[in-house]
Amino acid sequence: MRTVVMVGAGASCEGPGVFHFEKAESDQAERSNSFGVEEAISFGVDGAGGFYIGNGGVRSNGDYMTRKTGNPPLGKGVLAALAEEHEDYWGESVQEYFGKFPSDFEKGMELMYRSMWVDGSEDQKNRFSYSILLMAEYFSRWNCYRDTFYARLLTQLIQNDLISTSGDNSSTTFVSLNYENLLERAIFDAGIFVLHHSRKDTRRENSVPVWKPHGSSNFVASAVTGTSRYPTEEDLDGGFHPENRDALQNYLRRMRSALEERMKEKLITGNALPPLIAMSLYMPDKPTIVGRTAIDSIRDSYRRDIEAADLLIMIGVRPVLDDHRLFDPVLIGPKRILYIGRVTQDWERREFEDFRSGCKGSVEHVANTFEEALNRGVFHA
C-alpha cells in the first residue's frame, strides 16, 4: 500500500519537547549541565544528499548553546520573533512600511518581496537577501528531543507496519511543508535514513524520502556550498546541498558577515546577492529564488507520489485549494485521506467540506489535534 504522511505548520506548532537553541557567546555563557552529549545530536550529511545521525556534542565552534522551550510560531508569530531578534530588519519600521504584515504575514511578505527584490535598488535587494537569511537562520535553530508528537507518530507508524527501521520503505513517503527540520529529526531518532533528493538510496534499505516542496532552512545552494564567493542569480538556479547543523551555522555566520560588509561599504558588483538558501518565500505561491531546478524536481516527485497514494495522512495542513500546486494532486489522487486538523469554527467546517467534496477519494476527519489523533491511535492502514 502506498502511503504518504504530510505535515504542515499545525503539526510543528503543537506538542511538547520542542526546543529553540540559541547561540551564546562562550565568554558569557555558563557551562550548563542541563543537557548532555547524548541529547545534543547533530545532523550529518553524505554526498547523496541524505542525512545520518552523528554525535554533535553540546558545543559549536567554542560557543555554548542555551535553550528555551516552545514551538515554532505561525505567521504573525514569526514576524514577532524575528522583530525581537533583528529589530533593524524585521522591526516596527518594516512592519509599518509594509502595512499588511500585522494582519496577513504572507501578504506583507509579498509586498516586501515586490518592493525590495523585484523593483528595489541594489541596496534594497541586499537588505532583502539579508532579511531572508535571518529568517532561514531562525528556523534552522529549532531542534527537538525524543518525547515529541513527531516521535510518537513514528512509533505508531512503525508498530503498524507503515514504515520500517530495517526493511524496504519504498511504498512510504513523508512530505513536510515546514522550513524547520523537526520531522526529519524524529525520523533520524527512529533509526531511519532521510532522503531529500531521490526516491531511494540503494545503499540503505531503511531510507525514506522526505519531500519539502517549499524548500528548507538547511538547503544551501550548491553554487556556494563550501565557498565564500558571491554567486550570480544564474549560479543559484540549479541544485542545493542539505547541510548538517554545525556546517549550516558556520555557513550562515559567514554569509551574514559578508552581507553586512557588502551593505556597509556599498560593495555592489553586478547583481545583488540572492538569499542563498533554497527556502521558498513565505508568501502566496511560495516562489523560490534559489535552487529552482532542484525544488521543481522535488515538487514533481511530490505530485507523483500524492497522485499514486492509496492512503494520505494530513497533519496540521489547511486545505487551501487555491494553492493548486499542492492541492490539485490531493484532489485527484489518494484513494483515502485521513485529515487531522481543527474543524470547530464555521469557517473551518466550510473549508473542510469544500475540500472533502472536491476530493475523488474518501476523506475522513479523524481528529481536531495531533495529540488527539495520537491518543486515539489512528495511524494505521
Image: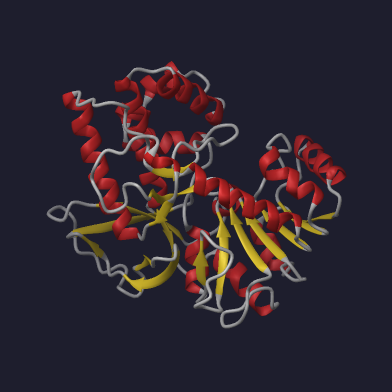
**What is the x, y in percent for residue 182?**
49, 59
**What is the x, y in percent for residue 78?**
46, 38
**What is the x, y in percent for residue 374?**
67, 66
Q: Residue furthest front?
A: 234
Q: As drawn, is 108 to the left or to the right of 39?
A: right
Q: Residue furthest bottom?
A: 166
Q: As drawn, is 198 to the left or to the right of 379?
A: left
- Residue plotted at (26% across, 69% down): 33
Figure quadrant of the N terminus? bottom right
Task: Compare residues 15 and 360 and report the one nearer the observer.
Answer: 360
**What is the x, y in percent for residue 83?**
37, 32
Figure quadrant of the C terminus? bottom right
Task: Compare residues 40 and 289 and report the one nearer the observer.
Answer: 289
- Residue plotted at (29% across, 53% down): 249
Q: As drawn, is 91 to the left or to the right of 350?
A: left
Task: Compare residues 15 and 204 and report the one nearer the observer.
Answer: 204
In the image, residue 39 above or below residue 354: below
- Residue plotted at (29% across, 47% down): 252
In the image, residue 220 above or below residue 60: above
Residue 231: quadrant of the picture? top left
- Colour mapping: secondary structure
- Residue plotted at (27% across, 38% down): 230
User: Is residue 113 something that shows in the picture?
Assistant: yes
Give the number of marks. Answer: 0
In the image, residue 363 above or below residue 266: below
In the image, residue 7 above or below residue 375: above
User: Is residue 101 something that shows in the picture?
Assistant: no
Residue 349: quadrant of the picture? top right
Residue 91: quadrant of the picture? top left
